[in-house]
Amino acid sequence: MSAIQISDSVNWVGVKDPGLVYFDITMKTEFGTTYNSYIVKGSDKTVLIDTVKKEFKDEFIANVEQVTSWDKIDYLLVNHTEPDHSGAIGDVLDRNPNIEILCSAAALPFVKNVVNRDEIKITGVKDKHEIDLGDKKMICRLMPYMHWPDTMMEYLDSDKILFSNDGFAAHYSFDSIWTDAVDSKVDIDYEVFYYFSMIMRPFTGYIRRNMAKLDDHEINIVAPSHGPLHRKEPRKYLDSYAEWSKDKAEGRKLVTIFYASNYGNTASIADQLALTLNENGFETAKVNVGLKLDESFRDMIEQSTAVVVGTPTFNGDAVKPVWDFVNLFSTVYSIGKKAAVFGSYGWGGEGAKMVAERLSGLKMKVFEEQYRARLVPSEDEKTELREFGKRLAEYIG
Ligand code: FEO
């Protein structure tokens, strides 16, 4: 695939990877992907934006050379150092070691660890840093955790193009590079959502804070780092991100109790705990995660003011369906979400403590007590459970 002109001053010099089956190991990519890179030419300076995955470096280099010579490139903007975009930085510097790398301050150590060489010209920029190209300028916008701490975007004022890196992207490879040229049988807007759900969703708290920066700019084209560029209704994609990133728990007092139960004892604790939380002003929902791991659990976590996890202990461990469920917390924005753990057990009862430690490791705010009952909860244990429930209600607030 050759370089493609996208405006008077901008060329796409990326590569296509239609055969990719999985991205980041876990994300199925039915339509492959692209690794988008761009060259922006001003009257005085020329900028290369991002590189590509290492195995595609030869095609990338050929595309760059169709547009300019290496000695004419002044800056390499590294918007994000994940290897699908940083894989060919060393190959760029091999051809012109005088290129100055511009990146966020957070990216500085990452870039150094990518190129592993001492003599590089590199500058960490601040938000709103302006790159003067002569007859036009680019404005850097730092977008931390969208989706890495290093993430940066740029706005090209003359052409009103937002180079958005992984933001508003889709894993989609086809002959064209424009969203409006995608086959009508393909729901490309769903592919943008699927990308958001798999890549961006754990960072919605950060995305909420970052999105307002883009209100400063009138945007005609959104040029992401994967998939097609959005020139028809470009704002629609920004608005969708704002909507998908909303705090779904805001204004609610919902506690969702996720549990697994074999003989019904953990389930009976869940029932009693829900009643106590109801009596203390909370709406509750109970979900048996032992039946099926469902995509909707991610929505429920996001919609909950707090979550409670209940697990039996088998063989000195929490049970697998509970661990599978707990793994969902890192797929949504759960940092700082309040949580508590309870469980039923026969002789050891370690499972609840292990789950509580895991949730703390995920930076959730975990209630320091875990309620545990041996086998069938006794009347004393039920009384204790009601007291636990009241203290938990106070903790959630
Ligand atoms: Fe496309 Fe986060 O790399």
Image (cartoon, rainbow, N blue to C red):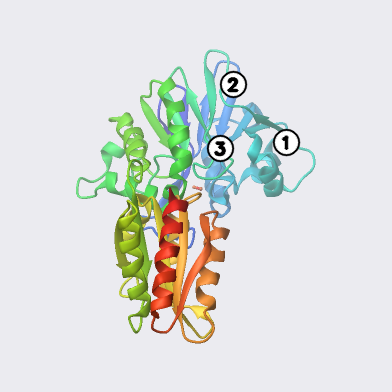
Q: Comparing marks 2 and 1, which lies closer to the viewer?
A: 2
Amino acid at the residue labelled 2: Ile
Q: Amino acid at mark 1?
A: Pro
User: Which residue lies at the image location 50% right of the left edge and 72% below the top edge?
Assistant: 352
The label number, if any, that marks residue 131 in the structure image:
2
Q: Which residue is mark 1?
A: 97
Element marked by disc 1:
loop
Q: In this rendering, is residue 363 above or below 125?
A: below
| Label 2 CA crowd tier, 10 Å (few <14, some 14–19, many 20+) | some
Spot occupied by residue 118 in the image (x, y as percentages of width and height): 79, 42
Nearer to me, 11 or 327: 327
Position in image of residue 380 (x %, y %): 43, 76
| Of residues 261 and 199, the one drawn nearer to the viewer in this rendering | 261
Residue denoted by label 3:
79
Q: Secondary structure at mark 2?
A: strand
Q: Nearer the viewer, mark 1 or mark 3?
A: 3
Quadrant of the rendering where the N terminus is positioned: top left
Q: Are marks 3 and 2 in contact (CB under 8 Å)?
A: no
Of all residues shown, which one is farthest toward the top?
Answer: 135
Q: Residue furthest left?
A: 185
Residue 71 percent coordinates (x, y):
66, 29
Badge 1 residue CB within 8 Å of ligand 1: no
Give the alpha-carbon distance from disc 3 to disc 2, as whole Å.
14 Å
Residue 9 located left or right of residue 127: left
- How many residues crowd around disc 1 within 10 Å: few (fewer than 14), some, or many (20 or more)? some
User: Mark 1 touching mark 3, by CB under 8 A?
Assistant: no
State the residue at coordinates (40%, 29%). 6
Q: Residues within 10 Å of mark 3 (few under 14, many from 20)?
A: many
Q: Quadrant of residue 184?
A: top left
Task: Please report the residue visible at 57 percent of the width from the left and 26 percent of the height from the top.
Answer: 127
